[in-house]
Image (cartoon, rainbow, N blue to C red):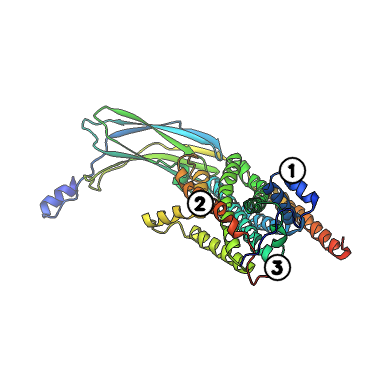
Amino acid sequence: MTLQVAPPDVGTSHQDRAAIQGQSGWLVIAEQESRDLWTSGRGLILLFLFSILLSAVTYLTSTNQALNFLEQRESVNLVLQLAVAVGVLVTLVVSADAISGERERGTLESLLVTPVSRRSVIAGKLIAALTMWFATFVVTIPYVWVLARGVGILGQALALGFCVGTLVAIGLGSIGLLISGVCNSNKTSIAASLFLLLILFAPTQLPSGLPQGWFFDVLRRANPIDSALAYISSILVNGHSWTQDLSYLITPLLTAIIAGGALVLAGPRLVRLTPGVHAG
Amino acid sequence: MIMLLAGVLSGLPVPALADPINVDVVVDPPVISTVLGDHFEITTEIKNAGTAPTGEILAHLNVASIEGSVYVDPEDWSSERSQQLSLKPGESRDLSWEIQAVNSGRFAAYVVVVPFGDSVKGTEELKISPLVKVDVAQRTTLTAGGALPVVLLVPLLIGLAGGATVYRVRRRRVTGT
């Protein structure tokens, strides 16, 4: 059963309404959600753990004196791939908590009575989740600088990581929001999202020496994370041009379009209260 | 000749004599000094010095370390290390080899010409170019000491910001403001 939403003017202060009417609803929600994420310390704790991981990998790489010139390019590739994969992971975790978490904490009801369309709520929450990706990318910059400055691929690596990572983050962030809207329990939502990410990430760990027929190539290209990471490798390690392996980005782009489109279409039905869930 | 004569006399099968690939291989420049990571190019001129066509032959580039125990993977140095050609009598061809210095130290680059195709008997002699001495100077771009400031400072700054935020949130909860 869906709770009937009160008219826009009920339960909203004049100041709130003025603020919401003064700018787009999605912007207000994005601002509020981002503030909650970063001032509660939740975002910073995830970012701290992320920086510890990158520090460990970067330091281990820099202590290896046997690396030749090309292997140093591969180490830039490794750190960038790790940054994209973990950055997308934390974005997915934040978006998976966005709706189901509000339901469990009993704060969704108060959000529903604000004069903001449910599509704007979804858009605002997606943008707030994406701030997590942008923050992880900013943290990645000094690590990539340390590894890439000597091999002349710093600008290329950063531009590549930003473009590809943002595309994947939009797609998987949207999927996380869809899962969060469908699941009644926050635990289920986060577990399902993590499981999905694990499924998508696992093929990237297959040894490259294995025989790779057409089926492997189809699987790789159908997987938005695997194909995005393969695109990064083809440019950074193999020295291909940006347009040479552009077909690798079809799946990440389609994922962003399809999941984003599904959010727009199903958004009003996803942002709702459900029976049996604590409502504050 | 002695083997041939002995073989004929004894009735034993005679091993085929080697068919030399009658080409001259000249390489330029003879010495290269470069820095780790830089690209350079060497050129080889292969000339058919015989009176018959060479048939299909393959020029193949190789790189070897000539000091210490540096492991060299020639594929890292050049992605295209084989060029196929055939030469008429007196004809010559210039071949260019794009190389990137991926290890520091002293190396020898050389081109070997081998026969190519189904007609290869396995007894042919190979022709090897003079070596190009390649001195690659070290360029240290990544050290543990150089990475340390970033590796320590970034988590420290984020940890301090996160700690301060969590402390402020808890304090606000306690004071109820």
Q: Are marks 2 and 1 on the same chain?
A: yes
Q: Is residue B6 left or right of residue A76?
A: left
Q: Which residue is mark 1?
A: A22
User: Looking at the picture, do discs 2 and 3 lie on one chain?
Assistant: yes
Q: CA distance from mark 1 to mark 3?
A: 29 Å
Task: Name the chain letter of the residue that bears numbered label 3.
Answer: A
Disc 3 crowd rating (10 Å Cα; few below 14, some 14-19, many 20+) is some
Most foreground residue, B100 or A127: A127
Q: Position of residue B176 (x, y in %)?
A: 87, 63
Q: Is residue B164 visible?
A: yes
| Quadrant the C terminus of chain B occupies | bottom right
Residue under circle 3? A279
Which label's residue is closer to the chain start, 1 or 3?
1
- Binning the other alpha carbons within 10 Å of mark 1 as few (below 14), some (14 to 19) or many (20 upward) gives few
Would you say A129 lies left or right of B159 here? Answer: left
Residue B49 in which image quadrant: top left
Within 10 angstroms of label 2, few (less than 14), some, or many (20 or more) residues?
Answer: some
Most foreground residue, A37 or A232? A37
Q: Nearer the viewer, residue A128 or B32?
A: A128
Q: Position of residue B143 (x, y in %)?
A: 66, 49
Mark 3 lies on a secondary structure that is loop
Front one among A10 and A40: A10
Residue beneath the point at 67% across and 48% down: A26
Amino acid type of the residue that numbered disc 2 sits on in the rendered structure: Ile
* Amino acid type, callout 1: Gly
Q: Element at badge 1?
A: helix
Q: Position of residue B79 (x, y in %)?
A: 43, 42
Q: Chain of mark 2?
A: A
- Identify the residue position indicated by label 2 in the image: A258
Secondary structure under the numbered disc 2 in the rendered image: helix
